[in-house]
Image (spheres, helix red, strand yellow):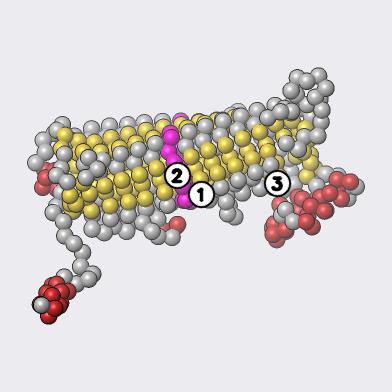
Amino acid sequence: MRLTYLSCFLSILITLPCWATPTYPPFQPLLDAVKPNETFIPPPGIYAGPIIIETPITIDGQNKVTIDAGGSDSVVYIDTDGAQLRNLHLTHSGESHNKIDACIQVRGNFNIIKDNLLDDCLFGIDLQQSDYNIVRRNRIRSKPFSLGLRGDAIRLWYSKGNKITDNDIRDSRDTVVWYSKNNLIKGNTSIGGRYALHFMYSRFNQVEDNRYHDHSVGIFLMYSDDVEVRGNQIYHSLGATGMGIGFKESSNVTIENNQIVYCATGIYLDVSPYQPDTTNQIIANEIAYNTIGILFHNDWQGNIFKHNQFKGNHTQVAVQGAMTANRNVWENNYWDDYSGFDRNRDGIGDTPYQLYAYADQLWMDVPSAQFFKGSVVLEILNFLERLAPFSDPVMILEDSKPVIKN
């Protein structure tokens, strides 16, 4: 009897090598039988992709259907308007960045992609020249590659009017919005990537109530005007270039009611606003426990800082090149290192808040000195300079109406 079992086991090994990939029934023939505007509920099971959707149909997997691309190509192509994908598990795309191997590639308008699990795909959802789509409540995971070799979780390219809401993104690379306008990005959670959200040449977008944790960069605005960023929670953007929110030549941006906490740099501004006669509004944000609260790349102007809370930052505001940030508007902010009084109890300090750069400017002017940032040596130099300055300190900014209580 034992020999019989052993011979059977050996025959299985011979006919099915350990590296053999299981074959699944193809999904496309089932799809081809569905008429336009019908709702298709496939029999539960695992099916082989890729599939192409060319008519406006609804596919509802009811959380019982998996489509596996077998490690080659994208899993689903949507090449139509008005299709819907719901409650599906899409997995195992190819690994080509050139082809943008993804769980879902969208090339159409007014499609709905919601409540799906997308994993082991290089890219998650790629929308190119696709407008007014809804991407909602999907769980998106990339392939287990090093950070730079993963694909983007969600990618918008020349696409407008899309709603990207309530998705859960883990261990992907970026979410990117390039050459795209009038999109809503709301209520998403993204953890453990590079850029939680990266704009490039994109205008009139809204970013609201997202949670971005443990990225190198939370939100970066590059050549992107008229963007509204409200109510987001950005934590732990760390590393050599870590920042909560970054600007590069971006104008008419509103940053309001965000929490930017425990980042290397809270907000970074590089030649922003860029367009003449424009401003950036940075209003009522909590900027707390960062190495630098606000970092200016140079002596720029046109930013309005009002009603923000600056708490527990190692350096509240810094300007590279020993310049000042006083050409911007600073008013009614709370500074936890303000040392004035409020004798009439109106909630406003009796004297302005003034921030000076002393010896601690060394770590900005001399790159090798950054190793000692926050060290006892620099803190002692800074303390001695405040007692008896070796040279005139540089006033970084003045807030004429500092708030006493946060």
The residues bearing labels 2 and 1 have C-alpha atoms spaced at a distance of 9 Å
Q: Are marks 2 and 1 in contact (CB under 8 Å)?
A: yes
Q: Residue at x 81, y 50 (%)?
A: 382
Residue 401 placement, left or right of 50: right
Residue located beneath label 1 in the image:
215
Q: Is residue 74 magenta?
A: no
Q: Which mark is residue 78?
A: none
Amino acid type at image mark 3: His
Tell me which numbered mark, 3 or 2, is placed earlier along the sequence: 2
Residue 104 placement, left or right of 9: right
Give the x, y percent position of residue 146: 43, 60
Which is more toward the observer, 46 or 358?
Answer: 46
Magenta extent? 185-204
Residue 165 image-quadrant placement: top left
Q: Residue at x 14, y 44 (%)?
A: 43
Reply above or below: 72 against 115: below
Residue located beneath label 2 in the image:
190
Q: Within 10 angstroms of label 2, few (less than 14), some, or many (20 or more) residues?
A: many
Which is more toward the observer, 306 or 128?
Answer: 306
Residue located beneath label 3 in the image:
314
Q: Residue at x 16, y 34 (%)?
A: 39
Amino acid type at image mark 1: His
Give the x, y percent position of residue 170: 42, 49
The residues bearing labels 3 and 2 have C-alpha atoms spaced at a distance of 26 Å
Tell me which numbered mark, 2 or 1, is placed earlier along the sequence: 2
Amino acid type at image mark 2: Ser
- The reply to whether residue 356 is in sight is yes
